[in-house]
Image (tube, grey):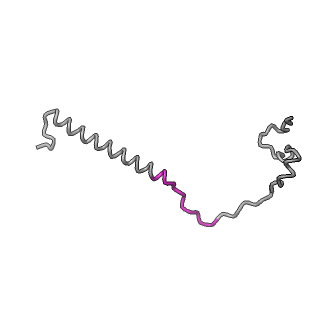
Amino acid sequence: MVTRNQHDGASSSGWWDDLPSAIKKRVQRPETSEAPAPRPSEEPAPYRPAVVYDLSRLAILFLAVAVANLLFLLIALSFLSGHDPLGH
């Protein structure tokens, strides 16, 4: 048989009281008055995962390929239009 939660689980502060007594015996009650750990005075550099580095390199590669394609198409267009590609 399942007993109904008094607060329907909506972030209730009395969740410990809703647990069955058998579970309360197996698990210690959590400490609620813990003070947060002190933060170091200097902030460490933000962690940049290798995925971000790899994606940055991939984006630069795509940009280089796009510029190379544009350059090739402009040169091909200049040949097709009948003009000298170097302007002489």
Seen at 20% across and 37% down, the residue is 76
**88 left or right of 50 in image:** left
Q: Give the range drawn in magenta.
A: 40-53
> Image height check: is 55 above or below 35?
above
- Quadrant occupied by the N terminus: top right
Mainly helix, strand or loop, the magenta region? loop
Seen at 84% across and 46% down, the residue is 14
Seen at 32% across and 42% down, the residue is 66
Kindly give the residue lying farthest to the right in the view shown.
21
| Quarter of the rendering containing residue 40 | bottom right
Q: Where is residue 3 in the image (x, y as percent from the top left)?
A: 86, 36
**71 left or right of 4 in image:** left
> Image height check: is 23 above or below 8?
below
Kindly give the residue lying farthest to the left in the view shown.
88
Q: Where is residue 29 in the image (x, y as percent from the top left)?
A: 83, 54
Seen at 77% across and 39% down, the residue is 10
